[in-house]
Amino acid sequence: MANNNFGFSGNVNNYISGLTFKGAWNANTNVPFLQSGVGAAGDYYIVSVAGNTNLDGVIGWQIGDWAIFEGATNQWQKIDNHDIVSYNTIQDEGVSLPQRQVLDFQGIGVDAQDIGGKTVVTILQGLPATAYGLYAQTANSVPVTATIIESSLIGAGLGTLSVPANGFFPGASFRGDFGGVMSAKNNDTIRIRIKSGSVVLADSGPQTLPSITNNVWQCSINFTIRAVGGAGVASIVTLGVFHDTKTSNGTQEGFAWNTVNNTTFDTTGINTLDVTAEWSSNSPLNSIYSDIFVLNKIY
């Protein structure tokens, strides 16, 4: 029996003669039962189910490995005789990798299991804990003008505004930054709402505006998940700051609000962010749109 294809820590010369094949061995459940230091010289089993049964300090058994009892030391040894499957490149990266016997899956929500002769890797859809960009608007939003219908201020863009079911964790925090142009009829009001679907996360309430024409506006929104679960258990706190700047003299006006929603917020379903505006009258002098919106996860 040649040993040039085997990874083996013992002396293979001890097994050139007197080998006795005893059958298949389940290294996960240890069936048939094998015990450290107990066996007959030259007896060997071939692993049929991978596992970590400890035989004289040897673990990490793979399908095809041999468990062989060495008479000189009265210990079980392993001959690495399993097929090694390797991936030569990382998809979409083009980086060559050396062949390895172990694949180490790391990161939050990554799980790998040996199921039915194949390795199944599961990557949860939850959000990672590190900061990263979620959405960037690439076109002006549809102007909310001459209407009293609540309408979205978010324009088309790249990325996602949705968090999958059970994708939040306590402490997860986000920041959204808006900018655009607005005009308003004197003493009419505007109302800004931050929403997840039909659930209102924060509401500025009606805010009275002076007569303005083509003022630049900015709005910053910060929110943090305090608790996760269904409605009545989950909790989110939201802070919003809205101000506009007169183009004629640089005067700034604005308003702010903060809200805790611990009654209707629900993290067990999909949450899709929206920010809306609503005017108190359908005057053509009332108009607002955004030309920039960036949403980031900050914790």
Image: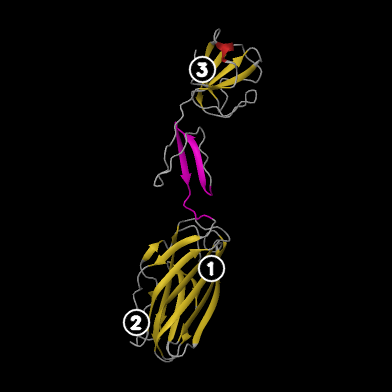
Label 1 to label 2: alpha-carbon separation:
28 Å
Q: Which of marks 3 and 1 is nearer the N terminus?
A: 3
Query: Can you say whether 9 is above or below 196 in the image?
Result: above
* Residue underneath mark 2: 145
Query: Can you say whether 41 is above or below 288 in the image?
Result: above
* Residue underneath mark 1: 223
Q: Position of residue 153 (x, y in %)?
A: 40, 74
Mark 3 vs mark 1, foreground winner is: 3
Label 2 to label 3: alpha-carbon separation:
81 Å
Label 3 to label 1: alpha-carbon separation:
63 Å
Q: Where is residue 126 in the image (x, y as percent from the top left)?
A: 49, 54
Q: Where is residue 244 in the image (x, y as percent from the top left)?
A: 46, 83
Q: Which of marks 1 and 2 is nearer the N terminus?
A: 2
Kind of residue indicated by mark 2 = Thr
Q: Which of marks 2 and 3 is nearer the N terminus?
A: 3
* Residue underneath mark 3: 3
Q: Give the range drawn in magenta.
A: 107-128
- From the viewer's perspective, is 219 left or right of 157? right
Tags 2 and 3 in contact by the CB under 8 Å rule? no
Residue 117 magenta-drawn? yes
Front-most of 72 and 154?
72
Residue under the image location 45 percent in, 62 percent down: 134
Instruction: Kindly indicate the quadrant of the structure image that contains residue 116.
Output: top left
Residue 268 magenta-drawn? no
